[in-house]
């Protein structure tokens, strides 16, 4: 899909030319911005396509006080985090730009798109196309395309009672800057998936308090956690670690007999922590007295 839409101020075609400059050329994008539709290569033999959309909106995911380049990076990195949880390889992105009229919105979007392009160069992701439109608030949507080997793709479902609950990195305190500067655990997720180390996995965007029940529910299970084991940022208590959200870490379930082997073979500097276990569905969740709320966009 080509960039198209209606915008005031700077000529639309000139602005689109600015936003699409500096992106890497990747073999998976056969025809990119400038046509009605993009053409992308299909997945290699034995692989399936992976699709994901994520948005960042002013007043919800960022404010104008946040550096625009980091906001653009965040729009792409959020979708990358979901790819990590599937063990997938990203190839190309469609970027939709929502721009209010007046003020300094255009300059802010220029810097945001430059930040997204810089991140794409680092991660080897091409720009397939996108959309521009006038909107009440400033925002960016990144729709990511890629693939994963069918036999190694990981889902939220698939865990079994007795599996050990693990999480990468640290939790809580994201609004101090981590929500912009987080590193998608792409290599870690791909390694876990290819090696068959995990039975279920997802990324933590809405907080452990929202996302762990989702994983357990998808696998038809309940859960128990030890709040003392939760990896927390400095100054963050267990309640905040569970409920604040925007951690963008990997939550995964490992067969208990494989935990020690995972410790021995883990090849990354990123730490991971086991903090609980999955239980049969008939048992009530045990949270050690920590309220499980997480972040809900519609609450």
Image: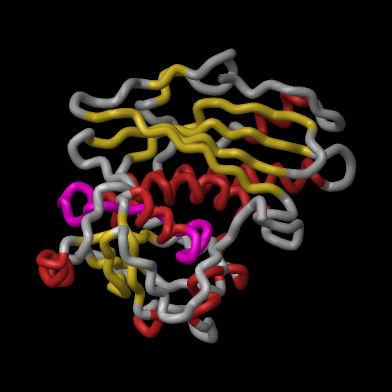
Q: Residue at x 12, y 64 (%)?
A: 258
Residue 178 location, x and y as percent?
A: 54, 67
* Residue 224 is a magenta residue: no
Residue 217 or 265: which is nearer the viewer?
A: 217
Residue 220 location, x and y as percent?
A: 31, 51
Q: Is residue 24 visible?
A: no
Residue 123 or 88: which is nearer the viewer?
A: 88
Left or right side of 214 for 11? right
Image height check: is 134 above or below 296? above
Image height check: is 280 above or below 93? below
Residue 20 or 256: which is nearer the viewer?
A: 256
Left or right side of 250 for 121? right
Residue 273 location, x and y as percent?
A: 30, 73
Image height check: is 45 above or below 92? above
- What residue occupies the far front of the structure in this picture? 282
Q: Is residue 158 visible?
A: yes
Left or right side of 183 for 42? left
Residue 53 location, x and y as percent?
A: 52, 38
How are the colours assigned in the image? Answer: secondary structure
- What residue occupies the far top of the structure in this picture? 36
- What residue occupies the far right of the structure in this picture? 102
Query: Range of the magenta residues?
Result: 192-210
Q: Residue at x 74, y 29 (%)?
A: 133
Image quarter where the C terminus lies is: bottom right
Q: Residue at x 59, y 18 (%)?
A: 34
Q: Residue at x 49, y 50 (%)?
A: 77
Image quarter where the N terminus lies is: top right
């Amino acid at each position: 899909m080509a960039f198209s839409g209606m915008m005031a101020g700077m000529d639309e075609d000139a602005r689109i030319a600015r936003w699409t400059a500096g992106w890497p050329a990747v073999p998976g994008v056969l025809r990119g911005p400038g046509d009605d539709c993009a053409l992308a290569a299909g997945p290699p033999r034995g692989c399936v396509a992976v699709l994901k959309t994520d948005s960042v909106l002013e007043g919800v995911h960022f404010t104008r006080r946040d550096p625009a380049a980091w906001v653009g990076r965040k729009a792409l990195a959020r979708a990358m985090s979901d790819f990590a949880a599937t063990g997938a390889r990203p190839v190309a992105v469609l970027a939709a730009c929502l721009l209010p009229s007046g003020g300094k919105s255009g300059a802010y979007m220029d810097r945001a798109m430059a930040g997204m392009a810089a991140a794409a160069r680092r991660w080897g992701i091409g720009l397939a196309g996108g959309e521009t439109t006038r909107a009440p608030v400033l925002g960016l949507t990144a729709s990511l395309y890629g693939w994963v080997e069918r036999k190694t793709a990981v889902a939220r479902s698939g865990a079994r009672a007795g599996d050990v609950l693990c999480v990468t990195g640290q939790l809580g305190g994201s609004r101090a800057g981590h929500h912009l500067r987080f590193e998608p655990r792409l290599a870690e997720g791909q390694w876990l998936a290819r090696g068959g180390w995990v039975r279920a996995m997802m990324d933590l965007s809405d907080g452990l308090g929202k996302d762990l029940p989702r994983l357990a529910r998808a696998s038809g299970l309940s859960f128990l956690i030890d709040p003392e084991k939760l990896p927390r940022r400095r100054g963050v208590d267990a309640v905040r670690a569970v409920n604040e959200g925007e951690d963008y870490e990997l939550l995964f379930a490992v067969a208990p007999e494989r935990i020690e082997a995972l410790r021995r073979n883990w090849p990354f500097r990123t730490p991971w922590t086991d903090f609980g276990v999955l239980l049969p569905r008939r048992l009530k969740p045990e949270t050690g007295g920590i309220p499980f709320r997480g972040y809900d966009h519609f609450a």
